[in-house]
Amino acid sequence: MNSNLFMVIAASAIFYGTPLFFAALGELLTERSGVLNLGVEGMMLIGGVTGAWASQHIGGTSWFVVLMSILIGTSAAALVGLLHAFLAITLRVNQTVAGLAITIFAGGLGLSSYFASVWNVAQRPATHPIRFLDVGGLADTPILGPIFFHQNILTYFSWIAVVVASIYLFRTRVGLQLRAVGESPQTADAMGINVVKYRYIHTVIGGALAGVGGVYYSLAIIPTWVDGMTKGAGWIAIALVIFGFWRPDLTLAGAYLFGALQSLSLTLKARNMHINGDLLDALPFIMTIVVLVLLSGGWAKKRLGAPASLGVPYEREER
Amino acid sequence: MSEKIAVRMSGIVKRFPGVIANDGVNFDAREGEVHALLGENGAGKSTLSNILTGLYRPDNGEIELNGESISFSSPRAALNAGIGMVHQHFRLVSSFTVAENVVLGDESTGTFLNAGDVAQKVEELSQRYNLAVDPRARVWQLSVGEQQRVEILKVLYRGARILILDEPTAVLTPQEADALFITLRAMVKEGRTVIFISHKLDEVMAVSDRVTVLRGGRTVGTIETAHSSRRELARLMVGREVVFDRVERKINSSDKETVLRVNAVSALDDRGNKALNDVSLTIKTGEVLGVAGVSGNGQRELAEVIAGMRHASAGTISVNEKEIPNGKVRHAISAGIAHVPEDRLHTGLASSHSIEDNLILKSYRTQPISRYSVLRRKAIQENASQLVEQYDVKTPSTETPVRLLSGGNVQKVLLAREFSANPKVLIAASPTRGLDVGAIENVRSHIVAAADSGVGVLLISEDLEELLSLSDRIVVLYEGRIVGDLPTSSATRESLGLLMGGVALEEHTS
Amino acid sequence: MKSPLRLERRLTQPKKLNWLVPLISIAAALALGAIVLLLTGKNPLSAYHRILETAFTSKSSFSGTLVSATPLAFTGLCAALTFRAGIINIGGEGQFFMGAVGATLAGLALSGQPTAIIILSMVVMGALFGGLYAVIAGVLKAKFNTNEIITTLMLNYLAGIFLNYLIFGSTSYWRDPQSMGFPTGKQLQPRAFWPSLHIVGFTVPLGFLLATILGMLLWFLYARTRFGYEVNVIADAPSAARYAGMRTRWKIISVMAIAGAVAGFGGASDVGDFRHVLDAKGLQLAGYGYTGIVVAALARYNPVSAVTVAILMGGLTNAGYALQGPNFPSGLVGTLQGLILFTAVAGEVLTRYRIRTQKSGALSEVAA
């Protein structure tokens, strides 16, 4: 492999890994509060379709349109997150089924496709896609430039997000309280922490970040809407949280690994390498299963980092 | 002790679906006293304390703190008012450090946490109250006694003037309990109030200044401990005379044959750590062998290995000198081993299933319950109605889910099923825990009757009174080893307590 | 906690809830769907009217509904079996695909045989392929405790890629060598087509009839046999199952195998009854596996009800196909089905809790 090919793959690993990271970071925060959200795929698609719609209908400078599209896509997905919070926290519905319901309702055959069809989103490409952004000429740095700084604003933002999230979780009082809510809501409650509030907020944030990932798909990767265009990214994001032991930094690394797998397929196909395209398409899914098996058996049996009360509704007045 | 009332609760009513937990409870505690709340399981003690700590809101009634009427909307409000609780099931985050647990929920620590500062603050506090514990250790690494100290530190850190302790000695050896009582006395000397919840008469007599007795969700009365007696408190708590006699057994097991032999068994716990280490014991027909020990010293693993639920990493188990295959429940069942597990509702029974379905949990593979892999509803119903009648299970119907039954009736269903298989060996793990006095007597009489009919009984219990009154012989488990084996006639609370704490008798007596 | 809603655990579950809750769920889903339609400028009344007309009220359309219901009956049974056993198998989709692959293989290879033999072989091969595919996730869960939700989902995508490979990415046995421009699958011989039955004027696909029988058999398996008893205990009280000496791992694998075989049977019926070809794109667009989860949830995981509910969902799907156009946007049917799943799931709450509202300390009951 020559170094040029390596740089292309490294750069596109970051490019394709970024939306996975956003969705996974959202899921990570939600799970840290003890709520399991299997609706990520659906939330991404809702974020994606509303973001695409916004970019077609909002007028103004390119920057303004892009920011508004991200904002609108994020808010729409956050609303779906709120729906999940209501089902999981207030109604104490089985969280697995509730998340599945979200994905089926909002997913590729559901609401996102309905919106795309009533708003005519699919017919035309986004007028203001998210383009690469050169921050202070850094893109011209040798080797590092093309890999790290030939990216878009959301990627740069994701690097800020990973630092902020790590500090938030492990260095702040509120982060400590959040982790306590996910580990032992009884303890948190007894110590005067509002379990319901923490869970609601972080489920909504989780939805919003999934929405960012969705907008990335519809405005940065393929700036034309296709029904179900995330193609399982939401589910891979859920697996990424497990791979990352519920830590933002490791999750980012995992996201780039999966980004590399995705980009590998496209890059090699584009260069007419003689590798079966279907096999390359299958790689991320096979890898997910393999890593999941490695992490569920043997040395990782104790589920390093998994919040102890993940997926368990909290009910105070039970006897 | 001053005469100043620190907290007064009057006319407290709290209803849960199907139960009235508190039905007009009156209670007051003075500044600088240890006030015991005495009552059986289900008398309403925990509900009352959960109301006082803001976890539950009362449906009716009034709470006064230092003469001012208050109502707590949340645990935070109660904490801020100076009321802290040490729960029976610790409220600790086991993956956090001691220091993180202590400062959890404290809004005054600022936005960012400095691990060093926090640990130092906690260290100072633990030295001041002589509650030794390493603030940097993770909670899951601590012993149960240390975890309890963290719980106490937590409420002291929050500046609690009123401390509520819910059954604090349940997880301690007698010696550790004595140390706790000294800490409590030191705290009331500083003018704090301790509310001590218990159903154990001895410790209430030993530690409290006054006692309030609850029964069936109502206050029976409040008395000065010094002016009362064990017998009087027992009568108030149960509502009738209770006799403290050793259960009479018609035993003479010296010439009987060995029914259960556990030979050099070792086993791992769920985390893969060694939980049983070279354990050997024998039970003769008609013998009751008691197993004493602080919970978590291998009792559960011992019961599970014998019942075939857990693989022994070394050693053998034989019934009537015939070895049974390692880790095979079905073989253990057919060899005649009955098992009343500690966790009745989730392990011994499928709590959401009907009584009928639970009564066939071990016989569903055999005729007449099933034939050609098909269950026979009629045989199942007959089996259930017969056992429900024989064991006097109080239930609206045999189709009622087990979880809706009272604790005593749950245990009856379990015993009915286990005894109906005519076992040779019975493993009973904490068979009376959480039951009221009537149910305890019932369960004990069933166990004694089984032993009298020749069943070898392995009785695992943390209740020393129970072990001393039912067993013929007692072994003590400490860190997975048997550290003592003595006939009940020569065992005392003190000697057992030392063994349970890991102190070998020889080195102590010498 | 100051919340206007309060849930209070029910001590008993009134029997009437068994049919009341699904009805309330559907009504609520239609109401929510109406809101979506109104918000996007469509008339909900006319949309619902047209769905009802197209799906159920005329004889010919009802036959079309049964066609749409057939695959959903199989995937609904598949989901119901595993969910009832506490296994969240979302892999009905992929298992269905694999069943179609296996059945097409049998149908193509045995084209010279009598119809009965072809049909039987298609069913066996479909069930085998679907069952074995499901066993992958079953073994991983039983042996390594690997999260089956994610593995089955990944396997769905992999099965889809496998279909693409067979038809578009290779010159496999399933691909029609004559198709050059846009590759398609090889057609079955007409004698491999499954016959449909004519019952009181309706055309009933053979697959639907078989699904109905299968539903009853599976109900018996779960309600009246030792196997079913064990599955129920393992699902509701895993610790008690271990205590009673039940072989939990083996049961997980068996349930997955049966459920996968049922989905694979569905794949066989889809090829034999309707498509007569391995239709890689069509299968992936249909989403039978996911709709099957909706069916199972609304049927409260009861196999007999699952077949009935499949008719309802089939009606929606049928209307979706027939009406697709500017006035009837794509995705509407999927949205409605998703809403039904929501309300069915939320409706479960009513069976476990009473909902009370809290007004200034006084409690008033809203739903009994």
Image (tube, rainbow, N blue to C red):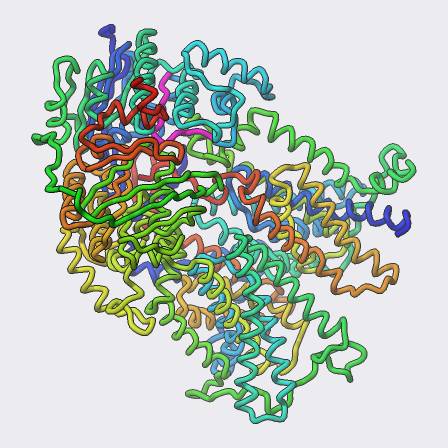
Q: Position of residue A279 (x, y in %)?
A: 74, 63
Using the image, determine if residue C358 lies above or below residue A109: above
Using the image, determine if residue B407 lies above or below residue C199: above
Rendered residue at 22%/28% (across/down) = B491
Residue C115 placement, left or right of B309: right
Farthest-out residue, left? B241
Q: Is residue C323 visible?
A: no
Q: Position of residue C261 (x, y in %)?
A: 52, 72
Farthest-out residue, front? B255
Residue C7 placement, left or right of A236: left
Residue B108 placement, left or right of B455: right
Q: Position of residue C337 (x, y in %)?
A: 52, 62
Q: Nearer the viewer, residue B488 or B165?
A: B488
Whether residue B96 appears in magenta in the rendering, the answer is no
Quadrant where the image shows the C terminus of chain A: top left
**Magenta span main SS:** loop
Q: Is residue A116 visible?
A: yes
Using the image, determine if residue B111 lies above or below residue C306: above
Where are the magenta residues, as a range? B82-93
Q: Position of residue B244 (x, y in %)?
A: 12, 29
Q: Nearer the viewer, residue B328 or B354?
A: B328
Rendered residue at 72%/38% (across/down) = A158
Image quadrant of residue B481? Answer: top left
Using the image, determine if residue C266 lies above or below residue C344: below
Q: Nearer the viewer, residue B437 or B74?
A: B437
Image quadrant of residue C8? Answer: top left
Image label count:
0
Whether residue B92 appears in magenta in the rendering, the answer is yes
